[in-house]
Image: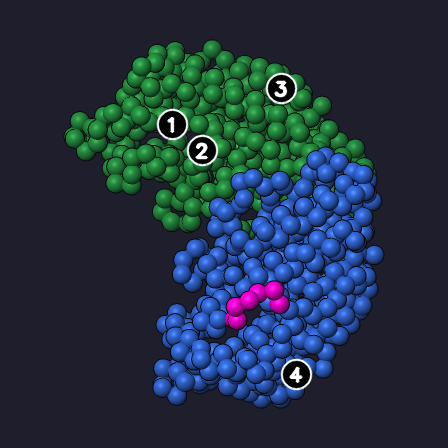
Chain colours: A blue, B green
Amino acid sequence: MAESFPMNGGDGTYSYTKNSQYQKQATDFAKGTIQEAILEKLDTENLLSVSNTFRIVDFGCSVGPNTFITVQNMIQAVESKCSLQGLDPGAIDFQVFFNDHTANDFNTLFASFPPDRRYYAAAAPGSFHGRLFPRASISLAHSSYALHWLSRVPEGVCDRKLAAWNEGRVHYTGSSEDVVRAYGDQFEKDMGVFMKARADEIVEGGLMVLIMPGIPDGASHSQLLFGVLFNFLGSSLLDLASEGIIDKAKIDEFNLPVYAPSVGEMRKLIEKNGCFSIERIELTNPRSKVDEPIDVHTLIMHLRAGMEAVFTKHFGDAVVEKMFHKTLAKSGEISEFLKSTYPKSTQLFLVLKRK
Amino acid sequence: MAESFPMNGGDGTYSYTKNSQYQKQATDFAKGTIQEAILEKLDTENLLSVSNTFRIVDFGCSVGPNTFITVQNMIQAVESKCSLQGLDPGAIDFQVFFNDHTANDFNTLFASFPPDRRYYAAAAPGSFHGRLFPRASISLAHSSYALHWLSRVPEGVCDRKLAAWNEGRVHYTGSSEDVVRAYGDQFEKDMGVFMKARADEIVEGGLMVLIMPGIPDGASHSQLLFGVLFNFLGSSLLDLASEGIIDKAKIDEFNLPVYAPSVGEMRKLIEKNGCFSIERIELTNPRSKVDEPIDVHTLIMHLRAGMEAVFTKHFGDAVVEKMFHKTLAKSGEISEFLKSTYPKSTQLFLVLKRK
């Protein structure tokens, strides 16, 4: 069973709901691109020839509101495509499945369902590293900022006897080749399972849109935005160790199960699965249309909403509170660092079609 | 939008999870009858002729564990019927939708999904007094102890200017004909909406099994087990009013939105809808195979798990705590009263088939 670390639930100060504006920017940016992909690549006539039900999934939906915006956008695009193909969009029954780990705060998600939604809403709780739906039952699948979560911490990175031991670090950014390879291998396994499950579930001609952090081919893994932030979290933990608040061995035993592939890696994994054609694959810059620069304080709050659970499970509340406090104090330093090293286009955008 | 008063969530002392053994007895009792109905009435060959997916819903699933037992039982029966009809049950993809109000504690439900389940689990949050699924997408529907909840308090029963004013009472048990009629009218409206929605959603030949409290034709509404308990809750509230803890007017403004129909009433409403044939309709005694008598203390705890929310919304936590405390102190009196008046068969069992 895959490990599960949900986004922070509820709607408090550290909740995902209150700290996901950057994900929303990414969602907004992807809006046009997703519409375009649906208009160009989705054959609604064929998909609706057997039944008037059109089933959509958002894998890794978290607790909203971004998932609702994305779903609404996709439905509008499907309706437009229907009209273009001479079908009556009003005759379609849309059923939307919101997927995330069982431990996700679905109660909060359900409480914020848009009242004027034009679809039958359902949830499919469980890990997407495995089957979730009946065969050939899904026409359109989407996942944004979820696939970078590995199903487990890569083998060996916490074992001091092995070459992949990731001493004093919480992530592979800036680590040895052995550590990076251990992460890459785990991602390959996870994507293999994910693609096999989706190939079973998505109907022939159905589309899958994937959005996740990625790096350019040939770029160093050290250039990953989140990796840089993870390193600062790691150094805050080392500060706490040197202050005697935690044992350094506790840091050695911890690694974030998060990986961002390159374009080439992702292409290879999809081709290995063999059930999907790649309709589009590219790195984009979701902030290209946003004027103000990234605010590091906000970014760290986002990171906290998304990542606190995994840290807390290992280090406990009090240490995690101190770690984020220390990291926030380094905002200026982080900001300078990001300006010099962070490549702009790190959002991997894929459109796949089930053969 | 229908009013929503979920069962008590979580797994604490007053939770539904810990206080639903009597519902489980009802579930156990219904087990054989449901299996029989599926074996006799369900044509799996016809239902699975288009697709290998078989979709099941439990309307008003609450937070478990009863819903999981029922679902497992229904799937086993469908598999048996498949085998009888020469189909391979292993080739079927079962998808099960757990339905309840949006405010139901789905997080608790999801956390207790059986790990070895043989179906794809999904939730469809929302009121069943309205559409929840695409047209003709459901093959088997079930609802146990949920349909007696009205979508709202009947019109007029809280209005001191009207004949249906239900002064000093929290329920129609023992009230005037006008009050009983107001409740009956609301139930008729709600069932109309429920049946219309289900007629849209259930595929031709699909079955719907309904289990709910009912009364024999010609019996007095005062003989309803729950009604008797409600009256004791009401009298405890009047005690609190006479002690000056609450205002009596506060009681006049409150009515439980719960109704138990007679067999004849239910038959009439199903025939009025016209989309379903009645394959079976009867009153049963779910405790006929249970040796020990009903324990009134346990019964009141059950009532609290299921009904606390609706009282609390109106009276607040402190008053509700006192009301249940006072009612528990009357356990002996309630027990004597039930022995003399309570008819044994008050579980309405229906099997309907979509024409």
User: Residue flagged by tag 2: what amino acid is it?
Assistant: Glu
Q: Is residue A29 above or below residue A330?
A: above
Quadrant location, the C terminus of chain B = top right
**Subunit of label 3:** B
In the rendered structure, which amino acid carries the disc numbered 4?
A: Ser
Q: Are marks 2 and 1 on the same chain?
A: yes
Q: Main secondary structure of the magenta part?
A: loop
Instruction: Give the residue number, with chain letter if any, for mark 3.
Output: B273
> Which is nearer the eye, B159 or A31?
A31
Instruction: Give the Cα separation between the discs numbered 2 and 4.
Output: 56 Å
Kindly report the distance in space between the C-alpha atoms of the residues bearing marks 4 and 3.
67 Å
Residue A133 position, x and y percent, is: 69, 50
Q: Rounded to the nearest whole Å, what is the CA distance between mark 2 and mark 1?
A: 12 Å
Q: Which residues are magenta?
A: A288-294
The residue pinned by badge 4 equals A220
Name the chain under label 2: B
The amino acid marked with disc number 1 is Leu
Give the Cα separation between the discs numbered 3 and 2: 23 Å
Mark identifier at residue B3: 2
Q: Position of residue A301 (x, y in %)?
A: 45, 68
* Residue A5 drawn in magenta: no
Rendered image: mark on residue B256: 1
Could you say whether the residue bearing mark 3 is in a helix, strand or loop?
helix
Left or right of A330 on screen, residue A46: right
Q: How many marks?
A: 4
